[in-house]
Amino acid sequence: MITLIFTSFITIFISNLLMMISFIISKKSFLDREKCSPFECGFDPMCLARIPFSLHFFLITVIFLIFDVEITLIFPMIPTFKMVNFFIWYKTSFFFIIMLLIGTYHEWKQNMLNWIN
């Protein structure tokens, strides 16, 4: 028990020491004008580098990623069709697809799938 506590203490001490060293070494100057400006081949920037980001585009991207992950969860269902009980496979597949349809319907009712507001 003592060795476990000692090992934990040493581990926490070393990790905190490394974090403090990296914090001290990596001090950055936020006041330097050249470092804060965007890089365009050594020339002064022609336009503002921080353009506004469309929140609607971000939400569509998140929806796409969620459905992309769900499609990867559907793919293993096809080869397992012959290996498992049909009734259990059917209930699982039906439940999963109903959940996808409910999610799509909810996003449609919230007008998340419309590009123009």
Image (cartoon, helix red, strand yellow):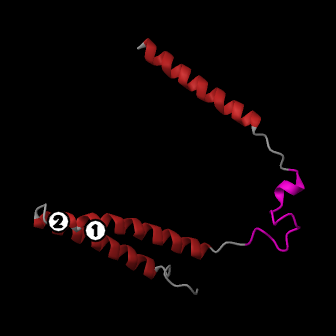
115 or 79: nearer the eye?
A: 79
Residue at 60 percent across and 23 percent down: it is 13
Q: Position of residue 25 (x, y in %)?
A: 76, 35
List the residue tagged with mark 1.
Answer: 96
Q: Nearer the viewer, residue 33 or 117?
A: 33
Residue type (three-letter) at the residue carrying disc 2: Trp
Q: Residue at x 11, y 67 (%)?
A: 86
Q: Main secondary structure of the magenta part?
A: loop
Q: Which mark is residue 89?
A: 2
Q: Position of residue 100 (x, y in %)?
A: 34, 72
Residue 94 horizontal side relative to residue 30, left or right: left
What residue occupies the far front of the structure in this picture? 41
- Give how far apart the Cα atoms at labels 1 and 2 are: 11 Å
Disc 2 packing (10 Å; few <14; some 14–19; many ≥20): some
Quadrant in which the N terminus appears? top left
On the rendered structure, is 38 left or right of 7?
right
Region of the chain picked out in magenta, as a range: 31-51
Q: Position of residue 55 (x, y in %)?
A: 61, 72
- Please tell me whether residue 2 belongs to the stretch shown in magenta: no
